[in-house]
Image (tube, rainbow, N blue to C red):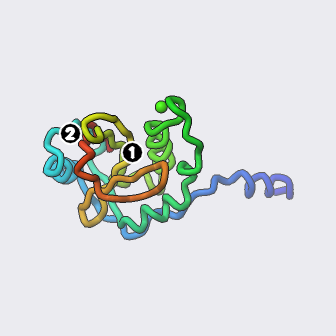
């Protein structure tokens, strides 16, 4: 291999984050049960029969790597839905795509709609992930989830 091709291979190699540690299996029926227990009226779209889960700390490692939170907010054209799609897209790679992670739509205080991300960790806790700030937190009682896609 000539030096030029070697450089091209090294420089063009996709940079990926090592896969999550401490992966555990979680199947679709368990995810359905966890979410419906917390939010019986939510519209839930689960796309696989089997998922993996890990710790909140491992997700934080991914969030530190992902750059979605650095993008500028632009009303309508790059707003909350686009941030949530970007983070979901970033995580949808062969190393991290198995996680029980998805898109969460909520109504805040019965007025404003908002899009974020959702994660079920290995302790079966539901977390919301704000893709504009990378903050992982519990879903506040003022947030009423109405659509979840994992
Ligand atoms: Ca938008």
Q: Is mark 1 on a helix, strand or loop?
A: strand
Q: Which residue is drawn at 36% across and 46% down?
A: 102
Number of callouts = 2
Report the disc number at residue 82. Answer: none
Give residue 86's position: percent from left, percent from top: 50, 42
Q: In the image, which disc is placed on residue 116?
A: 1
Sequence-earlier tag: 2 or 1:
2
Instruction: Report how far apart the C-alphas of labels 2 and 1 lie in the structure.
Output: 15 Å
Residue at which label 2 appears: 42
Q: Please tell me which residue lies in front, 57 or 105.
A: 105
- Residue at 33% x, 60% y: name it: 53
| Rendered location of residue 15, percent (x, y) | 63, 56
Q: Nearer the viewer, residue 56 or 15?
A: 56
Residue at horizontal 14 percent and vertical 43 percent from the top: 40
Element at label 2: loop
Indicate the quadrant where residue 120 lies: bottom left
Rendered residue at 55%/59% (across/down): 65
Question: Residue 66: x and y, percent?
Answer: 54, 54
Which image quarter: residue 109? top left
Q: How crowded is mark 1: few (under 14 residues within 10 Å), some or many (20 or more)?
A: many
* Quadrant holding the C terminus: top left
Instruction: Say whether residue 93 is visible.
Output: no
Q: Is residue 112 left or right of residue 65?
A: left
Q: Residue at the top extreme?
A: 76
Q: Considering the image in quadrants, where does the N terminus appear?
A: bottom right
User: Contact (CB < 8 A) between labels 2 and 1?
Assistant: no
Mark 2 surroundings: few (<14), some (14-19) or many (≥20) residues within 10 A: some
Please say if 28 is above or below 10.
Answer: above
């Amino acid at each position: 291999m000539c030096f030029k091709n070697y450089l091209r291979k090294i420089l063009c190699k996709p940079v990926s984050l090592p896969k999550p540690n401490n992966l555990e299996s979680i199947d679709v029926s368990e995810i359905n049960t966890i979410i419906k227990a917390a939010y019986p009226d939510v519209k839930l779209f689960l796309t696989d029969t089997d998922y993996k889960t890990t710790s909140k700390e491992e997700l934080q490692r991914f969030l530190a790597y992902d750059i979605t939170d650095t993008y500028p907010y632009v009303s309508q054209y790059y707003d909350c839905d686009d941030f949530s799609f970007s983070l979901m897209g970033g995580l949808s790679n062969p190393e991290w795509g198995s996680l029980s992670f998805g898109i969460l739509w909520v109504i805040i205080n019965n007025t404003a709609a908002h899009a974020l991300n959702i994660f079920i960790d290995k302790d079966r806790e539901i977390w919301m992930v704000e893709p504009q700030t990378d903050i992982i937190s519990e879903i506040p009682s003022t947030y009423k989830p109405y659509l979840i896609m994992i």
